[in-house]
Every structure is written in C-alpha cells, then in structure tokens.
Amino acid sequence: MLEAMLQGSLVSLEVFFLTLLFSLPLALPIALARMSRKRIVAHVVNAYLLIMRGTPLILQLIFVYFAPYYLFGISYDRFVAVIIAFVLNYAAYFAEIYRGGIEAIPRGQYEAAKVLGFTKGQTFFRIVLPQVIKRILPSSANEVITLVKDTALAQTIGVAELFRVAQNASARQFSTAPIFVAGIFYFVMNWVVSAAFARAEKKLSYYR
C-alpha cells in the first residue's frame, strides 16, 4: 500500500510543480492585460477571470477533458487535460494577486524612476517587481497550499494521484487507514511549502 501511495504522491507532485511552472509566468501577462487601457482587452481578460474564478475547478477539469471530444471528436491524455485545467484556473487566481500587488505600489515610485532616466521596462523589473513579490508572497503562499490539496481533484477524470490511490486501498482493505495516511502525506507537502515561503519572505524582508 505504501509503495502505491508513494507513486500516487509522485503524480500529485508532478501536477503541483507543472501547474506552478506554467501558471506563475502566465499570470503576469494576464494581470497586465487586465490592467490594460484598451477596454476590449481588459473586458476579454475580465470575462476569463470571472469564468475561472466563478466555476468549480472540478467542472473545469471535466470540460477541458471531454469538450474537445464532443465538439471536435478529439481525445487526448488525461494527465495533459489535468495540467491544462489547473494552469488555466490557477493563472487566473495568481493574476489577480499580481494585479493587487502592482496596483499597491505608490505612483510616486514610477515618477521617481522616470526622473532618474529608467525606461518602463527597467522601472517594472528593477523597482516595481521586487516590491510586488514581497507584497504578494503571503497571498501566493495560500494559493500554493490550496494547490497541494486541489491535486486530489485530478481523480475526477481518472488520474491516479495520491488521494485516488488512497481511496482504492481503503476500498480493498475496508479500512479508512489509507485515507489518514494520505492526509499525512498532504500535511508534509504543505509543511514543506509553508517553510519554503517563510524562508523566501525572510530573504525579501529588506524590501520596503
């Protein structure tokens, strides 16, 4: 049982890391588009954010996997569907966190950077972004911790991650012990994530 749960944990970790790998960078252009002065762009992105944040992730998983088949007759790998759904969902949440962090930077800092001869790109990446990262770390940590637990939803379309393996073992053994063991696995993963974010906050503490 333990070996199967370790394999399930690896699948959960793959979903976790791949989601972060793609959603974190994708969220930045989404946040900037949401703040765009072009109303059409801002409205389109806002509609995407409303859909992603206003519907359950479990429904999005089902749609991403089954919709291509019913609409175009195309089938593809379940794991790929999980990653696409998770990335689209979490990019929306991270985008709103980024937007809040960017809008919290005082306007005077942009003006001071302009006086000092910084370009818009230099201002954003050298002055604004480091402060934004410091401001959004607590909110981002909450989302990442939620992601660890949300990986259990991958079982919705038949991906054998940790919780599904635990459920199968529980059904075979007529015992809830595997479920509690899975809970310990999730706890350890979340503890590691929390510790990593605490360390990152400490390193960035010199930014005001």
Image (cartoon, rainbow, N blue to C red):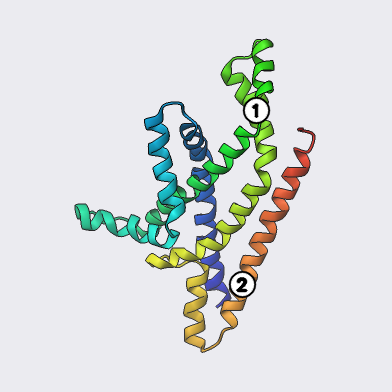
Q: Is residue 86 visible?
A: no
| 104, 160: nearer the viewer | 104
Q: Is residue 79 above or below residue 173?
A: above
Q: Which residue is mark 2?
A: 183
x then y, percent, for residue 201: 74, 43
Please state the horizontal and vertical placement of residue 135, each as a whole percent of the image.
68, 39
Q: Residue at x 39, y 43 (%)?
A: 47
199 or 173: which is nearer to us?
Answer: 199
Residue indicated by mark 1 = 128
Q: Residues within 10 Å of mark 2 (few under 14, many from 20)?
A: some
| Residue 29, x across and y down, in percent | 48, 33
Can I make out residue 192 in this image?
yes
Q: Is residue 136 left or right of residue 151?
A: right
Measure the C-alpha gap from mark 1 to mark 2.
39 Å
Counting other residues with Cα less than 10 Å from the Cα at mark 1, is it few (<14), some (14-19), or many (20 or more)? Answer: many
Quadrant location, the N terminus: bottom right
Q: How many numbered callouts? A: 2
75 shown above or below 128: below
Residue 119, image x and y in percent? Answer: 59, 15
Task: Give SS at disc 2.
Answer: helix
Please identify the quarter of the rendering in which residue 55 is found. bottom left
Q: What's under tag 2, amino acid-wise?
A: Gly
Residue at image coords 22%, 58%: 70
For image coordinates 54% across by 45% down, the residue present is: 94
| Rendering quarter of residue 180 | bottom right
Up/down of 119 relative to 74, above or below: above
From the viewer's perspective, is residue 103 above or below residue 200? above
Which residue type does callout 1 highlight?
Val
Of residue 137 and residue 195, the one placed in the foreground of this image is: 137
> In the shown orientation, is residue 38 left or right of residue 206?
left
| Residue plotted at (42% across, 65% down) | 159
